[in-house]
Image: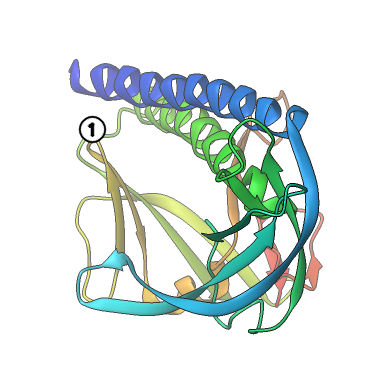
Amino acid sequence: MKTPKIVGVIFSLLGICMLIGDLFAYKSTSDFINNSEKTEGVVTELKRVTNNLYNSASYETLYAPVVKYKTPGGVEREFVSSTSSYPAAYSAGDKVEVIYDKRIPASAEINSFFSIWLVVFILTLLGSVFSIIGTLLLRIKEENNIPSEYALRIEVDGGSCSGMTYQLGFDGEAKDGDTVIEKDNIKILIDGKSLFYLAGAVLDFNDGLNDKGFIINNPKAVKTCGCNDSCGA
């Protein structure tokens, strides 16, 4: 079937496009920093931002700081930070360091890593994931004659040498309670119990001569086993 190859190409192209966008974002951010000045600002209020990233029925309220500052010429300006969080990272009255473009003083941001580099960081992460995982997932399917419509299932079970073990396989359908992650006909299935332990984990792939296959790097694991298939959390 040609479908796996087509989807693999689409995934790879999406990853490449994101990495190209990442280069432009990096150049733009670097240009902003090279033509910037720093000054002190004050958080005047917190703006509520509604986030429905996960699904349309689930909303989360985030808070973005509104910052007021003055340029060396005495011109007072105000901006809303591009990054928001819950709970709020700042309070009204907090003093912060502001970085602004000397050419366009209205272009300003709180001088912190995530406020300035967040877009670059996200594009780098997503571009890498789309480029690598999509291609490798399709390669494994083809090598094992797995139908293209099957999804990768990730589970966490008990009973290993470190307390829990990871189970990776392919499944033809989602079950009740599964979280389904899908993009361009590529599916990953995770049951509710496993999702709790896998939140924040990174799925990687080892293409070496030994232990070839998927690897899960889990920040919740307090201990791991030499077999790389289990962890304690």
Q: In the rendering, at what x and y percent does residue 221 appear?
A: 73, 70
* Residue drawn at x 55%, y 46% as measured from the top left: 106
Quadrant of the image for the C terminus?
bottom right
Q: Which residue is mark 1?
A: 148
Quarter of the rendering containing residue 218 = bottom right
Q: Residues within 10 Å of mark 1 (few under 14, many from 20)?
A: some
Quarter of the rendering containing residue 100 = top right
Q: In the rendering, at what x and y percent does residue 20 appear?
A: 50, 19
- On the question of residue 56 being in view, the answer is yes
55 sits to left or right of 216: left
Assign a secondary structure to mark 1.
Answer: loop
The front one of 132 and 42 is 42
Q: In the rendering, at what x and y percent does residue 121 appear?
A: 62, 42
* Residue drawn at x 19%, y 39% as measured from the top left: 149
The front one of 82 and 13 is 82
- On the question of residue 216 being in view, the answer is no
